[in-house]
């Protein structure tokens, strides 16, 4: 793919132009934390932002979402249709890679998810390379960052001479074409710095954690109960790990009667919750907390790879930094990877 560049001072012009044509979502600081939301003022975007607590998945899978309303007296069902065009700017490559895994799971038959597709199909994803990964990050293990991910249309990398911009898809090429006056071809000096940056960041991350991913497929057979039982003693079942994760996609639905219609909502759920697999009969295939923790890790590291040819973790480090009990997926990787 062709490499472009944009000058530092033109980034805000680009963001302003984007926000006139699309709903522009980007990270900015609010109440002391960086979070993704609609960016109304490009001056609020900080190129050195640190990782957000919640991932951008909520723009495609909201925490709670109306599915349909059925009006029995009118014999009419109203389904949710959303067609706004969203640009997700500045997401980290790991979060962009998580979107490509979600696409794999949710955009293909036999379980195609129309609600996800509605929001995802018009979205443009622009990542900003991570040149200073945080201590809990390990995207290098799954090759989902830190400079390039797998789900972005455009990748921006900050260098001393501006941003190197790589168009990764036809949508990305169309954006470059649309704002052509702001972009030019990246010169050799910039590309040298970009390549050096890739080597340095990957070397630094590689020195933290090295994993043989192929071994993880066998984790279900190899992992003894003891490890999960010990961790389960500390887990308080708060579900934070799943809710913060950019690619945990389990949900529950709730139906109720509202004035003149049946309404169905759906919302995030998690396999770590004791009610998640409990059936109406009272039967529960995952009764203990240790069962549920084991499932969480085995699903991400073995079952999703076997089914979708991608891992259920992109190494964003959110569950590592947020778990109040200090349960750390990197321990699983060190032990069985
Ligand atoms: S964040 Fe930690 S304590 Fe909370 S459910 Fe997940 S593993 Fe358990
Ligand atoms: S499992 Fe943890 S580190 Fe992996 S993608 Fe989810 S939140 Fe990030």
Image (cartoon, helix red, strand yellow):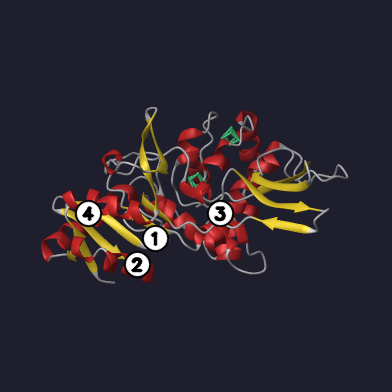
Mark 4 vs 1, N-terminal side: 1
For mark 3, give the secondary structure.
helix
Q: Are marks 4 and 2 in contact (CB under 8 Å)?
A: no
Q: Classify residue 131 as left or right of residue 307.
A: left
> Gap in Å between the C-alphas at discs 2 and 1?
7 Å
For mark 2, give the secondary structure.
loop
Residue 146, image x, y percentages: 34, 52
For mark 1, give the secondary structure.
loop
Residue 210 appears in the picture as rendered: no
Q: Classify residue 243 as left or right of residue 315.
A: right
Mark 3 vs 1, N-terminal side: 1
Instruction: Mark 3 vs mark 2: give the one in front.
Output: 2
> Gap in Å between the C-alphas at discs 3 and 1?
23 Å
Residue 171, image x, y percentages: 38, 67
Furthest residue to the front? Answer: 74
Asked whether 265 or 334 is in front, the reply is 265
Placement of 267 over or under 121, stated as above or below: above
Res. 143 mark: none
Q: Are marks 3 and 1 in contact (CB under 8 Å)?
A: no
Res. 168 mark: 2
Q: Which residue is mark 4?
A: 197
- Image point 72% across, 37% down: which residue? 274
Q: Which residue is mark 3?
A: 301
Mark 2 vs 1, N-terminal side: 1
Q: Which residue is mark 1?
A: 152
Dot 3: few (<14), some (14–19), or many (≥20) neighbours within 10 Å?
A: many
Residue 233, image x, y percentages: 64, 30
């Amino acid at each position: 793919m062709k490499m472009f560049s944009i000058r530092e001072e033109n980034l805000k012009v680009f963001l302003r132009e984007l926000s006139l044509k699309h709903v522009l979502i980007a990270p900015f600081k609010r109440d002391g934390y960086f979070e993704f939301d609609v960016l109304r003022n490009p001056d609020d975007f900080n190129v050195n932002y640190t990782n957000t607590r919640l991932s951008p998945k909520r723009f495609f899978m909201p925490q709670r979402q109306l599915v349909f309303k059925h009006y029995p007296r009118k014999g009419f069902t109203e389904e949710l249709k959303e067609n706004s065009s969203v640009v997700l700017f500045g997401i980290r490559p790991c979060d962009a890679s998580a979107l490509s895994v979600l696409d794999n799971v949710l955009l293909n038959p036999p379980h195609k998810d129309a609600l996800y597709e509605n929001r995802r199909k018009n979205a443009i994803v622009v990542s900003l390379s991570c040149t200073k990964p945080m201590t809990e990050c390990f995207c290098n293990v799954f090759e989902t960052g830190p400079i390039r991910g797998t789900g972005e249309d455009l990748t921006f990398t900050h260098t001393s001479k501006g941003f190197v911009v790589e168009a990764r898809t036809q949508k990305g090429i169309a954006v470059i074409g649309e704002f052509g006056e702001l972009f030019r071809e990246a010169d050799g000096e910039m590309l040298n710095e970009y390549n050096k940056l890739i080597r340095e960041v990957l070397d630094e991350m590689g020195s933290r954690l090295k994993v043989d991913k192929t071994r993880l497929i066998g984790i279900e057979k190899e992992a003894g109960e003891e490890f999960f039982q010990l961790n389960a003693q500390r887990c308080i079942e708060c579900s934070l790990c799943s809710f913060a994760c950019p690619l945990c996609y389990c949900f529950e639905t709730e139906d109720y009667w509202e004035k003149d219609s049946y309404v169905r909502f759906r919302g995030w759920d998690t396999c770590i919750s004791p009610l998640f697999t409990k059936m109406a009969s009272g039967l529960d295939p995952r009764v203990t907390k240790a069962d549920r923790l084991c499932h969480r890790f085995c699903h991400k590291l073995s079952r999703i790879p076997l089914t979708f040819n991608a891992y259920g973790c992109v190494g964003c480090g959110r569950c590592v930094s947020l778990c109040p009990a200090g349960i750390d997926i990197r321990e699983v990787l060190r032990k069985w990877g």
